[in-house]
Image (cartoon, rainbow, N blue to C red):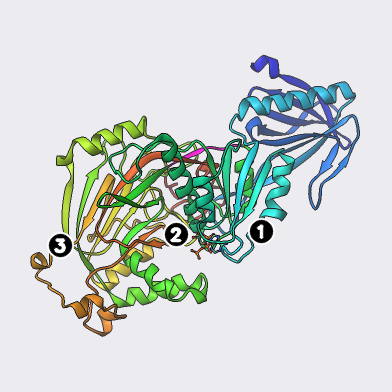
């Protein structure tokens, strides 16, 4: 195949001569001076060529084609530093080549198009796009039509666009309507919209496979359709943690080239019923209280999370609970091994669903149980990095290894807890504190101790009360917190969670190596301090 696709010739860009070579996985062009000496080479992986067009083509500000018969235009992925965040932005690069003859031009366009098909087989042809017009700053429609749709058109992708009119419309569509002919589903919105798509696609796949989502011991069927996220919400954490930046153009280019990132998903059950799926944060205590509080202040917009976080912190609460967990194999990885799950990460589970199901069902004796008072109990299937916390809740968590990281923060004094929270915003290790534990797990159970056991019997009045600033300025403490499941409050406190390895696939590739975070907090190319790269 490689020899078949090899092509080499002189091409012109303006009045400069280039030697262009298409060989194997790469297309590169090198400027050649008048004495035939090589100057700078630009090399693009064929998989990152977005499109090849005859003539001199521009797509921005609007598409224009000058149909000359010796020219062709190549569009490709170009990377640039994102300035404010740690990831790399992807932009559309464009180069217009002139050939000495039409025959050579046709040979180049044919070879490049064949190479594209060969080297990126997962490129979508047809996509189902859901736009939440009310997500984030309500710019979903504009973002899609001005930034994303022109790129899809250039890449020859046809899309069926649905602007949602109500919550859960996208989920219901995915559960009930004909999805034949689509290669993937794109959500234009925030984490809430992504969650709808996730629930719809997982549910549909299990329906078709005849599997019960309610049974936590069932090995769920991985979804055949990819999910693309065009960030347009007020929280876009799943996009950030899987792409490295919150940028619609970068995400659109990942979709176009058919990048494929498997993702673990946690199913949350109460008794024998599925409650929800989670990928980023399942949190009890502090994170549950912040969500519950923020719901009362929706009018504040995204600021409500900062406000509620401060108020809940000041309320100084801790909660009694029993946490049981099924540890993952410590020989394979650990949440304290200081690795980062970057693009091309090799920490992937093998035959995850079968293996994890067997151990989940067969060895109940391996469960570990702890009991006490906690500031928070969190479970995450990914690092959950976000702009405010660049390394995330669990910096060494992996996207697709079939495990989750369970973080237990035992009751402690307010300043200790503040230190824990503050470390999420820096590169300091938030687990290196005496009241914090982190475990890599396959499943978790949470229950409340019986009132007799804790010796903290509460009156009905106390149970109903949800006092505020209760730790610092009054004596009432609510009996229990709520679970925050990827931004939704769960109706039950006693839950069973199970991680399903690689249940869905995103059009993404994880955070790219060049964007890895240094101890000094700077990017690779900006670090002058000789610091150690966190790997
Ligand atoms: N047309 C619609 N009208 C009302 N709600 C919708 C509509 N379409 C989707 N939703 C719901 O809006 C919720 C929030 O959407 P999204 O995540 O896109 O925005 P967001 O601004 O990041 O959300 P949040 O307000 O949770 O921070 C989702 O849970 C989704 O189910």
Identify the magenta region.
258-263
Q: Quadrant of residue 265?
A: top left
Residue drawn at 39 percent across, 60 percent down: 424
Mark 1 highlights which residue? 141
CB within 8 Å, label 1 to label 2: no
On the picture, is 243 further left or further right than 481? Answer: right
Pointer 1 or 3: first along the chain: 1
Mark 2 highlights which residue? 389
Q: CA distance from mark 2 to mark 3?
A: 33 Å
Q: Circle 1 — which element?
A: helix
Mark 3 highlights which residue? 449
Q: Looking at the picture, how far across and down is residue 488, in whole percent?
A: 40, 61
Q: Circle 2 — which element?
A: loop
**As drawn, which residue projects farthest toward the bottom?**
473
Of labels 2 and 3, the one closer to you: 3
Residue drawn at 24 percent across, 71 percent down: 413
């Amino acid at each position: 195949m490689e020899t078949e696709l090899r092509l080499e010739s002189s091409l012109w860009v303006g009045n400069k001569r280039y030697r262009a070579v298409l060989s194997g996985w790469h297309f590169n062009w090198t400027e050649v001076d008048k004495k035939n000496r090589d100057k700078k080479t630009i090399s693009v992986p064929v998989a990152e060529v977005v499109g090849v067009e005859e003539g001199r083509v521009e797509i921005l500000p609007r598409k224009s084609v000058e149909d000359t018969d010796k020219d062709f235009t190549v569009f490709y992925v170009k990377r640039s530093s994102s300035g404010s965040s740690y990831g790399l932005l992807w932009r559309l690069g464009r180069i217009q080549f002139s050939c000495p003859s039409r025959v050579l031009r046709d040979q180049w366009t044919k070879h490049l198009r064949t190479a594209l098909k060969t080297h990126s087989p997962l490129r979508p042809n047809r996509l189902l796009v859901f736009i939440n017009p009310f997500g984030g700053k309500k710019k979903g429609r504009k973002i899609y039509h001005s930034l994303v749709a022109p790129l899809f058109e250039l890449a020859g992708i046809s899309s069926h666009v649905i602007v949602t009119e109500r919550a859960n419309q996208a989920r219901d569509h995915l559960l009930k309507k004909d999805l034949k002919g689509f290669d993937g589903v794109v959500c234009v919105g925030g984490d809430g919209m992504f969650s709808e798509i996730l629930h719809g696609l997982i549910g549909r796949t299990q329906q078709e496979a005849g599997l019960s989502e309610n049974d936590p011991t069932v090995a769920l069927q991985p979804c055949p359709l990819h999910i693309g996220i065009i960030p347009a919400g007020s929280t876009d954490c799943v996009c950030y943690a899987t792409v490295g930046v919150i940028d619609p153009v970068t995400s659109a280019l990942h979709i176009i080239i058919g990048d494929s990132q498997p993702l673990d998903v946690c199913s949350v059950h109460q008794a024998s019923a599925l409650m929800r799926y989670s990928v980023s944060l399942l949190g009890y205590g502090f994170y549950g209280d912040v969500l519950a509080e923020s719901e009362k202040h929706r009018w504040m917009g995204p600021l409500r999370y900062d406000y509620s976080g401060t108020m809940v912190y000041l309320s100084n609460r801790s909660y009694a609970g029993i946490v049981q967990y099924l540890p993952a194999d410590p020989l394979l990885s650990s949440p304290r091994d200081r690795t980062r799950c970057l693009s091309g990460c090799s920490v992937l589970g093998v035959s995850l669903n079968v293996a994890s199901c067997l151990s989940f069902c067969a060895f109940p004796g391996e469960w570990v149980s702890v009991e006490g008072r906690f500031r928070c109990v969190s479970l995450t299937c990914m690092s959950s990095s976000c702009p405010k916390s660049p390394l995330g809740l669990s910096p060494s968590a992996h996207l697709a290894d079939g495990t989750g990281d369970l973080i237990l923060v035992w009751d402690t004094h307010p300043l200790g807890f503040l230190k824990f929270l503050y470390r999420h915003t820096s590169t300091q290790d938030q687990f290196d504190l005496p009241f914090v534990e982190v475990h890599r797990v396959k499943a978790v159970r949470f229950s409340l101790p019986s009132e007799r056991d804790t010796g903290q019997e509460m009156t009905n009045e106390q149970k109903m009360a949800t006092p505020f600033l209760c730790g610092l300025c009054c004596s009432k403490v609510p009996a229990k917190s709520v679970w925050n499941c990827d931004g939704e409050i769960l109706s039950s406190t006693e839950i069973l969670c199970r991680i399903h390895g690689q249940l869905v696939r995103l059009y993404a590739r994880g955070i790219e190596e060049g964007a890895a975070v240094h101890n000094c907090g700077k990017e690779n190319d900006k670090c002058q301090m000789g610091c150690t790269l966190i790997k």
